Image (cartoon, rainbow, N blue to C red):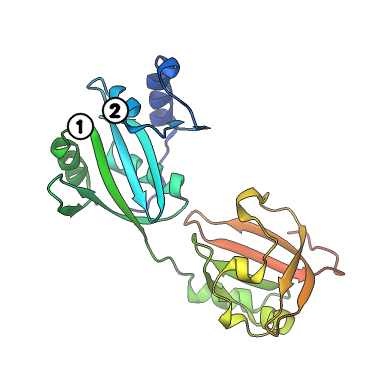
Amino acid sequence: DDDDCDLESANAHVDDEWSDNSDTISESSSTSSGMFMTDEDKLRRLGNGENVAIKVFFGSTIVMELVPLSMPFKKVKNLIEQKLRSRCRLSFSGGDGEFSSLTSESDWRAAIQFTEDQVVRVIAKAKPVNISKLDCSMFDNLGSAVIVANSQSEIIFFNSVTRRLLGDISSKKDVPSLFPSLDVSTYIPASWSPVEAVHRDGHSISVLLTMTESKNFLQYFVVVPSLTIAPVF
């Protein structure tokens, strides 16, 4: 159920649904799949029997979307994961305080059927994603420091060059603790940026860093000393 789905046609459908109602809602930000809504009542009123609202709870994050009733579950799940930038396990509230798993088309149709107010409430939990042994071996043979983090910016791998550059960073649990000045949300992928890295012993090191993200929302960081000419890949 982690296959990539082409959302172009579905997104166009949602955009069309929103275009006729844009004067009745407050917009917090535009997205490729329609509007990102903050007002549940306004979102619910746009249902009109052809759409359903989904309210997704992901830790402290809440995301709301309006999707066509005809949208298949795979595309709904992909939309949610793209919004959250994380592979997720989903469940839905049946309205009686009980939660049921949301893993298939039949589950999705049941979730729609159970809702009484045109809002499907979904609980999303991050699904652990790891890198393969082959990738670990490949990264260990590179001449640059490589650090891999999951979608919550938790460090899940670093290679031997990282250990030589920054020491054993096993105690660094996430990217912000290693690169305090780095704002991943505004970073331009595949560009090189000067940042300060925190060595294991606590002192700062000036480095150049580039980042890319996989389809599973893993973050890959390549780090070189700042005096090094950034390599071209």
Residue 14's disc is none
Q: Nearer the viewer, residue 204 or 135?
A: 204
**Mark 1: amino acid:** Asp
Which residue sits at x=42%, y=36%? 7
- Mark 1: which secondary structure? loop
Vertical arrangement, residue 33 with respect to residue 89, above or below: above
Give the residue at mark 1. 117
Image location (x, y in percent) of residue 74: 31, 44
Crowding around mark 2 (Cα neighbors within 10 Å: few <14, some 14 to 19, many 20+) is some
Give the residue at mark 2. 44
Vertical arrangement, residue 211 with respect to residue 44, above or below: below
Image quadrant where one finds the C terminus: bottom right
Q: Earlier in the sequence, mark 1 or mark 2?
A: 2
**Mark 2: amino acid:** Arg
Q: Nearer the viewer, residue 230 or 197?
A: 197
Which residue sits at x=72%, y=71%? 197
Vertical arrangement, residue 173 with respect to residue 180, above or below: below
Counting every numbered tag in the picture gives 2
